[in-house]
């Protein structure tokens, strides 16, 4: 199966210069992964591990001081088959945004305009991207779409503050899915919600995905949500991928020490075994440590971890781990001297592995 | 982990129901809530309505039995109002909050407030908002030490601060001259706890202390609460919506729904075998970190558009969503029924009604379908302007 989105050796840095002092925050540093049609792909990681920067690049929101150092984000669906990083802002807006890739953000209250009824926001999106000017047709289609998702059509005529948090978030999901995009990016969609409501919102997201067969990129720090929703999970730490595997593998047979710690520290009802906290905190990305970025907190670090960046190793069942203690065939080496690797090189090496 | 209260609880279990427990003979409870009600007036002068944020809650807490006590519930359930009551920030509309045998409103008069504050200390949700970003964090520790008379001057305060920081696994050397943004989320939340420890309080009220902290650091905070209880004999009121960490650390738990404590008792009983249908729903909705159970968690549940209507409704606030609802549930507020060491606000456990015990299942699916509601011509809650989300 061909990937819907192939991210290859992506390096996205924040570069600032103030009074002659330049600072580079290496937020995403050599990330390679593929998204396939009809799957829910989870990205897990702590705050400031580069999750948000990664989805900014994928959704085409690259603004100063964020700069792409190297890499490609290849999108392939329907008539589009090209690197999104080469698209102009106009092309992104007319071809990709909402139609191919849509984005569900964390705070639905700040997404919806508080002084306009929700239907007006829908109207803006539909008239800009599809050019439906006939009000009757627009109303019929929007109402049908909203009801298909199991929401009462009355929500369309409400103001955002009249709805509960869970309903607002589902309205945001309804907006994101109105043109049936190939990829829905959901950034912490349920973080501010109560558990019962969180369950309802995630169920809706999963139902939509199963019905339309598109891809959902679910970003959350809550591992328990990934366990219940995602098909595959990627664990990020300090701008790099530590491990990527099917959800069952991540939870039952994690190989990377960081993943192992994350999984074993999760509390669960019915078990009160003492769980240790990992000492230390994630590194500052403007001055990341040499070698493996996790070695300062790693309980099993050896000498090589301090100097050499571990290569991504590919284990059976599409299980990828970046750790010196794991044996297996290597993928593209992650660290390139000064990130000068060309796009075609990266493409060749990753294809060899597959 | 062993329960510190287990051995003694057995002998006193006869008088212990739900949140009301017994201390040493003759001991006055540290906190005693006696049928406390807090009502807020909402709306304008002409369209006023009453919102009962805490409804008829009774509980006791003893200094001789340090414990981690969890108040759990969703937003709008009254958890934060409870914490304001305990911190003396709010007076009950009716009922009485007693601190060491005296009404709290007398305790916090004049100079008594400082003494009360030195016994009861808060820890807040977002540590980065607790501290002024332009002020070094150690200043807060010194100020607290001097203001509460623990130290006479800054020099003495440094020793006090260092001792407090050591009990949370830090030292003054690590945080000296640092601004809040230079510390990690877990570190700064621990500094926040260390600050609360300086006046040697008997109780710490922590309102959602881990919800802003990363997953790998969350355990750091809750393990610290355990340590405080076991080593320093400090009780912690742990207010959270996270049932998994609540189970992990706490001794007793109270589940709140729309101002009522619907189920309360020892945490193993309440969370492992919940009795109230709402507790069952809440427990089922917590995502378990085990992918093998994912099918069950993602079976369909239906949610309402707004949540506020449950406040105004007579009778049990869960009646409209409950699969086991009976006529009586819609008529009167259920009283507490005793089941073992637990108090449950549900008519299913009324011995006078002789209801056969059956497992509660399918709680989530029983919620009134919105579409069905609309076809019957009932006005949708979403469009009536006075219905606002209280969350």
Image (cartoon, coloured by chain):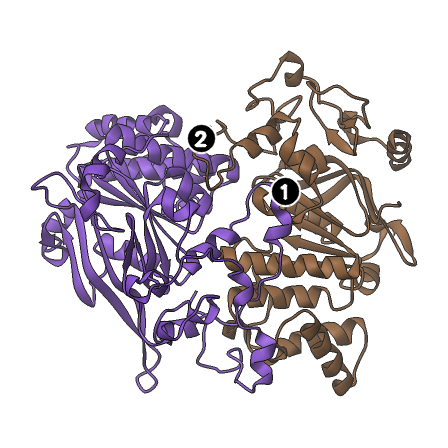
Chain colours: A brown, B purple
Residue B383's x, y, as percent?
A: 53, 81
Residue positioned 34% across, 33% down in the render? B226
Image quadrant in which the C terminus of chain A is located:
top right
Does residue B176 show up?
yes
CB-based contact (under 8 Å), mark 1 and mark 2: no
Residue A17's x, y, as percent?
A: 64, 41
Residue tagged by mark 2?
A: A273
Instruction: Tell me if residue B193 comes above or below residue A210 in the rendering.
Output: above
The answer to whether residue A47 is left or right of residue A50 is: left
Q: Which element is circle 2 on?
A: loop
Residue positioned 53% across, 78% down in the render? B382
- Please name whichever residue, A293 or A228, is drawn nearer the observer in this view of the structure: A228
Q: Which element is circle 1 on?
A: helix
Residue positioned 61% across, 65% down in the render? A170
Q: Chain of mark 2?
A: A
Residue B11 appears in which quarter of the rendering? top left
Q: Chain of mark 1?
A: B
Residue positioned 43% across, 60% down in the render? B277
How many numbered discs?
2
The answer to whether residue A139 is left or right of residue B328 is: right
Residues at marks 1 and 2, CA–CA distance in whole angstroms:
20 Å
Residue B102's x, y, as percent?
A: 9, 53
Residue B340's x, y, as percent?
A: 29, 48
Q: Residue furthest top?
A: A303
The answer to whether residue A350 is left or right of residue A211 is: right
Image quadrant in which the N terminus of chain A is located:
top right
Label annotation for residue B291 = 1
Residue B172 appears in which quarter of the rendering? top left
């Amino acid at each position: 199966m061909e990937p819907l989105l192939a991210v290859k050796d992506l390096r996205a840095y924040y570069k600032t210069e103030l009074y002659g002092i330049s600072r580079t925050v290496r937020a995403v540093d050599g990330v390679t992964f593929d998204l396939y049609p009809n799957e829910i792909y989870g990205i897990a990681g702590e705050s400031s591990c580069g999750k948000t920067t990664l989805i900014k690049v994928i959704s085409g929101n690259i603004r100063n001081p964020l700069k792409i150092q190297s890499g490609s984000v290849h999108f392939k669906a329907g008539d589009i088959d090209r690197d999104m990083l080469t698209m102009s802002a106009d092309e992104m807006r007319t071809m990709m945004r909402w139609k191919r890739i849509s984005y569900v953000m964390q705070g639905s209250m700040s997404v919806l305009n508080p002084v306009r009824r929700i239907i007006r926001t829908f109207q803006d999106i539909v008239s800009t991207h599809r050019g439906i000017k006939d009000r009757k047709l627009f109303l019929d289609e929007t109402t049908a779409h909203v009801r298909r998702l199991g929401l009462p059509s009355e929500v369309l005529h409400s103001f955002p503050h009249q709805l509960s948090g869970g309903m607002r978030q589902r309205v945001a999901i309804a907006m994101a899915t109105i043109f049936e995009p190939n990829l829905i990016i959901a950034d912490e969609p349920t973080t501010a919600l109560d558990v019962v409501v969180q369950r309802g919102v995630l169920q809706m997201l999963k139902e939509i995905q199963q019905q339309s067969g598109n891809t959902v990129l679910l970003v959350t720090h809550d591992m328990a949500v990934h366990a219940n929703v995602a098909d595959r999970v990627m664990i990020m730490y300090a701008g790099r991928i530590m491990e990527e595997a099917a959800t069952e593998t991540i939870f039952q047979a994690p190989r990377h020490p960081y993943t192992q710690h994350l999984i074993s520290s999760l509390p669960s009802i019915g078990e009160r075994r003492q769980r240790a906290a990992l000492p230390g905190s994630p590194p500052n990305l403007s001055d990341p440590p040499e070698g493996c970025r996790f070695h300062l907190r790693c309980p099993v670090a050896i000498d090589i971890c301090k100097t050499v960046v571990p290569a991504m190793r590919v284990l059976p069942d599409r299980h990828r781990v970046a750790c010196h203690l794991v044996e297996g065939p290597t993928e593209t080496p992650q660290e390139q001297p000064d990130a000068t690797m060309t796009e075609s090189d990266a493409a060749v090496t990753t294809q060899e592995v597959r | 982990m062993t329960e510190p209260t287990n051995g003694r609880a057995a002998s006193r279990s006869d008088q212990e129901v739900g949140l009301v427990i017994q201390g040493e003979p003759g001991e006055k409870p540290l906190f005693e809530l006696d049928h406390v009600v807090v009502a807020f007036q909402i709306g304008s002068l002409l369209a006023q309505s009453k919102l009962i944020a805490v409804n008829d809650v009774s509980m006791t807490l003893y200094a001789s039995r340090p414990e981690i006590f969890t108040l759990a519930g969703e937003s709008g359930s009254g958890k934060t109002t409870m914490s304001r009551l305990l911190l003396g920030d709010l007076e009950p509309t009716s009922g009485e909050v007693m601190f060491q045998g005296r009404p709290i409103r007398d305790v916090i008069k004049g100079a008594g407030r400082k003494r009360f504050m030195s016994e009861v200390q808060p820890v807040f949700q977002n540590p980065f908002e607790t501290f002024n970003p332009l002020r070094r964090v150690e200043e807060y520790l010194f100020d607290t030490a001097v203001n509460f008379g623990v130290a006479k001057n800054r020099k003495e305060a440094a020793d006090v601060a260092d001792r407090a920081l050591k009990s949370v696994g830090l030292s003054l050397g690590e945080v000296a001259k640092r601004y809040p943004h230079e510390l990690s989320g877990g570190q700064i939340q621990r500094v926040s706890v260390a600050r609360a420890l300086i006046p040697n309080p008997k109780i710490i009220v922590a309102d959602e202390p881990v919800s802003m902290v990363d997953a790998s650091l969350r355990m750091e905070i809750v393990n610290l609460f355990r340590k405080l209880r076991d080593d320093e004999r400090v009780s912690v009121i742990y207010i959270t919506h996270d049932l998994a960490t609540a189970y992990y650390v706490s001794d007793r738990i109270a589940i709140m729904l729309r101002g009522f404590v619907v189920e309360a008792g020892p945490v193993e009983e309440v969370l492992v075998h919940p009795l109230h249908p709402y507790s069952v729903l809440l427990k089922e909705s917590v995502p378990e970190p085990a992918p093998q159970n994912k099918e069950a968690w993602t079976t369909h549940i239906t949610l309402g558009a707004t949540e506020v209507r449950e406040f105004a409704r007579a009778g049990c606030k869960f009646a409209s969503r409950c699969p086991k609802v009976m006529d009586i549930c819609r008529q009167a507020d259920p009283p507490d029924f005793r089941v073992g060491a637990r108090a449950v606000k549900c008519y299913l456990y009324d011995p006078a009604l002789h209801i056969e015990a059956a497992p509660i299942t399918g709680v989530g699916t029983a919620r009134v379908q919105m579409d069905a509601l609309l076809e019957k011509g009932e006005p949708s809650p979403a469009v009536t302007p006075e219905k606002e989300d209280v969350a």
